[in-house]
Image: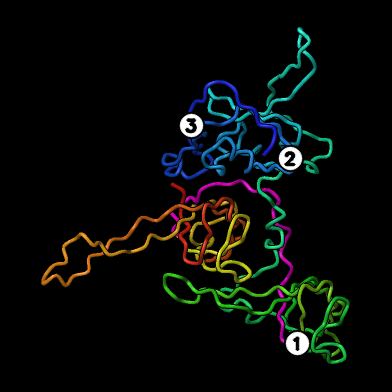
């Protein structure tokens, strides 16, 4: 973070979360508090994100949509803040506002005029700062695939390759069998490791390996039921037996953080790439999805599960044979931004973290 200036007495300000942005119950329960040492202003620089900037002002950065002097439609617009603009903290109103430095004052000094947010037409979107570090999650918006149930059961599959090659890469031919459902662009996947729920110990899905993309060259014809494809891109080696899925639609490019509309109590299923610990800007999956109240932009708080320990000072009961135990409270370690949602599983980006996140950690509705 750069170009912060702080003047005057620090006040603790708070703004109630707008009922239009979250469910009424959530709106009453949650408050967006400003930091006691929040700066008076910030000049936006290239590389900033709305999350980073808001983190300098707010105790919970994901609250930023609630404290900007904008309506929901303006907040959802990805083209409303640019490098060079000045963000002012209106302490009396408990709001963040945009200002623009203009001209010179009568006494020759630089003047600052507060303006309402304006539509910017030149270079629209090209230089606008993102809500979150989108570059980190872009590969996850369309590539990894969570398989729930038998979703790939009837998916088209590669049955043979040109010249009987064991593996194929970019520019090679692949012969595919199955119903294309009118599609011409596909992604290739290979079923990978099972995702096991840390609580129930049941397999809730499979994380498939993304292999690359294929383009239809010629549909099956003349009595054949095999389609001819060309490999358009190859991230990994692919071959006979790998399955195809239609290319997903272009993902949304802007994200408005918000708490879930219902109470969510999830667990971290896995850390992408199979590592044991995750830090900031790493991706994890959780055992809740759209059918459990999650959608794109949902923010959850992350906690280490409190350990159960023996209370050495408690009564051990009859003949002193008991083993009295007590559960320690869950410890908050960070926040998780949900950016891709399946039925009962979702991908989230770790936005802040004070300790490494591990499989089994809790992800729940912010308090």
Q: Is residue 180 left or right of residue 164?
A: left
For label 1, the residue is: 240
Q: Is residue 128 above or below residue 342?
A: above
State the SS at label 3: strand
| Left or right, residue 49 beside residue 24 | right
Quarter of the image containing the N terminus? top right
- For the residues carrying marks 3 and 1, which lies nearer the camera in this image? 3
Q: Secondary structure at mark 1?
A: loop
Camera-nearest residue between 155 and 91: 91
Pair 3/2: label in front: 3
Which residue is disc 3 drawn over?
14
Dot placed on the residue nearer the N-terminal end, 3 or 1: 3
Magenta stretch bounds: 240-265
CA gap, disc 3 and disc 1: 59 Å
Please report the residue visible at 22 percent of the width from the left and 65 percent of the height from the top: 324
Structural crowding at the residue carrying mark 1, measured as other residues with C-alpha within 10 Å and reported as few (<14), some (14–19) or many (≥20): some
Tag of residue 79: 2
Q: CA distance from mark 3 to mark 2?
A: 26 Å
Q: Earlier in the sequence, mark 3 or mark 2?
A: 3
Q: Residues within 10 Å of mark 3 (few under 14, many from 20)?
A: some
Residue 234 x %, y %: 80, 74
- Percent from the top left, x then y, of residue 224? 82, 90
- The answer to whether 320 appears left or right of 88 in the picture is left
User: For the stretch drawn in magenta, what is the main secondary structure?
Assistant: loop
Q: Position of residue 254 (x, y in %)?
A: 68, 48
Which element is circle 2 on?
A: loop
Residue 346, image x, y percentages: 56, 63
Q: Is residue 57 above or below residue 279?
A: above
**Which residue is the extreme one toward the top?**
107
- Alpha carbon distance from label 2 to label 1: 45 Å
Residue 226, picture quadrant? bottom right
């Amino acid at each position: 973070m750069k170009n912060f200036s702080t003047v005057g007495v620090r006040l603790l300000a708070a703004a109630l979360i707008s009922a239009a942005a979250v469910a009424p119950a959530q709106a009453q329960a949650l408050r967006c508090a400003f930091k006691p040492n929040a700066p008076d202003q910030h000049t936006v620089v290239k590389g900033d994100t709305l999350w980073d900037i808001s983190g300098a002002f707010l105790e919970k950065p994901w609250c930023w949509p609630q404290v900007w002097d904008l309506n929901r439609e303006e907040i959802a617009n990805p083209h409303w803040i640019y490098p060079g603009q000045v963000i002012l903290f209106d302490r009396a109103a408990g709001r963040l506002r945009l200002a623009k430095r203009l001209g010179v004052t009568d006494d020759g000094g630089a003047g600052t005029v507060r303006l309402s947010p304006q539509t910017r037409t030149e270079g629209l979107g090209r230089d606008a700062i993102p809500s979150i570090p989108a570059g980190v999650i872009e590969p996850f918006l369309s590539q990894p695939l969570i398989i729930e149930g038998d979703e790939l059961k009837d998916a088209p599959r590669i049955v043979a390759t040109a010249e009987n090659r064991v593996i194929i890469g970019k520019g090679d031919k692949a012969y595919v069998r199955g119903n294309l459902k009118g599609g011409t662009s596909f992604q290739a996947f290979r079923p990978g490791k099972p995702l096991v729920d840390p609580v129930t110990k049941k397999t809730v899905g499979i994380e498939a390996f993304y292999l690359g993309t294929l383009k239809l060259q010629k549909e099956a014809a003349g009595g054949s039921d095999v389609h001819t494809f060309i490999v358009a891109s190859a991230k990994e080696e692919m071959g006979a037996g790998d399955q195809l899925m239609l290319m997903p639609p272009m993902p949304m490019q802007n994200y408005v953080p918000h708490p879930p509309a219902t109470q969510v109590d999830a667990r971290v299923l896995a850390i992408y790439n199979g590592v044991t610990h995750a830090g900031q800007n790493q991706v994890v999956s959780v055992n809740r999805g759209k059918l459990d109240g999650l959608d794109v932009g949902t923010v959850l708080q992350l906690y280490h599960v409190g350990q159960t320990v023996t209370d050495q000072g408690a009564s051990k009961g009859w003949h002193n044979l008991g083993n009295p135990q007590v559960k320690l409270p869950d410890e908050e370690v960070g926040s998780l931004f949900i950016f891709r949602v399946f039925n009962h599983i979702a991908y989230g980006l770790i936005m802040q973290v004070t300790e490494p996140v591990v499989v089994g950690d809790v992800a729940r509705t912010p308090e």
